[in-house]
Image: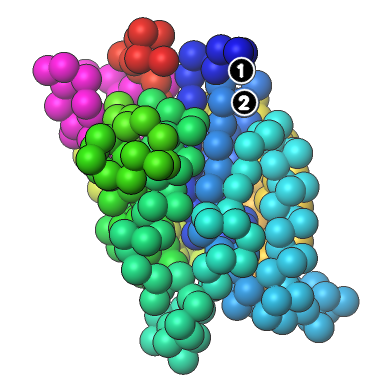
Amino acid sequence: MTEPPARRLLLVHAHPDDEAINNGATMARYAAEGAHVTLVTCTRGEQGEVIPSELAHLTGEALGGHRQVELGRAMDALGVRDARFLGGPGRYQDSGMMGLSDNDNPRCFWQADVDEAAADLVRVIREVRPQVLVTYDPDGGYGHPDHIQAHRVAMRAADLAARPDVRPDLGAPWTITKIYWNRVPRSVAEKGFARLRDVLGELPFPASAAVDDVPGVVDDSMITTEIDGTSFAAAKAAAMRAHATQIEVAEPWFALSNELAQPLFVVEYYELVRDERAGARAGVPAGPRETDLFAGISEESA
């Protein structure tokens, strides 16, 4: 039996394209370094707004199928070989933005029973045995119902996967050592938008987004970890371009369907919220920030 890679990273996202925007450089870096990177996407993004006019006919299931293909292309760009949909493609549907009638669809992710959806993720956790999990904060970064639900399911699955009394049919229990939430330091966002204002007239976007339009912007004091993905900037941009229905890239800037420009960040930031190492404490450490999601994790934890 082939031994698994010593480092194993699991990321849980709501829709295709979220992973490239939030973690594209991180994923590319760890994949290139030989870590096993697993992406679990909770929906196929059937309610997304389509940017290219030639693809405007794509809606519902047709859009979901197309975005599934886009996700595969994005993973190729990042060098990631293990990308899955929670419960299988189409098991949970896109819930749309908060307050829309799509939120009431019994098949949408927002309506899913958290423990049932978590069981689908427990199966993956016990198979892959990741030491590190990355997902959203309780608000999902910006209040989208699928992002909030992805947070709930990921955190619940991490708890359930560690318990030997829970679903032994899904594999042996596994405790994830470190759990991170996606973050962007406010100072970094402000500097990025200041640079954007200087070049906006040269870009194919009519206006700029605002700092608070960026999901996960928090006070710098909350940041525990920064991953320098500068060497993987091209890979991240290529992965974002692969999501052509959702993102227009004019590197190092991009826009979503609202056509509002924002920076494409290649240094990616995180908040460590759980640390199961003996004597370790989650939260902002004294001294420099971590520069490795696997910092302090020994190979014995494999």
Residue 112 is labelled as none
Q: Which residue is drawn at 76% across and 61% down?
A: 244
Magenta stretch: dominant secondary structure: loop
Badge 2 vs badge 1, beta-carbon distance below 8 Å: yes
Label 1 sits on residue: 34
User: Which residues fall within the magenta stretch?
Assistant: 268-292
Amino acid marked by disc 1: Gly
Label 2 sits on residue: 31
Quarter of the image containing the N terminus? top right
Can residue 146 be seen here? yes
Where in the figure is residue 5, as x and y percent of width and height?
55, 16
Amino acid marked by disc 2: Ala
Element type where label 1 sits in the image:
loop
Q: In this view, does 34 lie above or below 155?
A: above
Q: Residues within 10 Å of mark 1 (few under 14, many from 20)?
A: few
Q: Looking at this rendering, what residue extends furthest in the front direction?
A: 169
Quarter of the image containing the C terminus? top left
As for residue 294 lying within the magenta part, the answer is no
Quarter of the image for residue 265 reads top right
- Near-viewer residue (81 or 225): 81
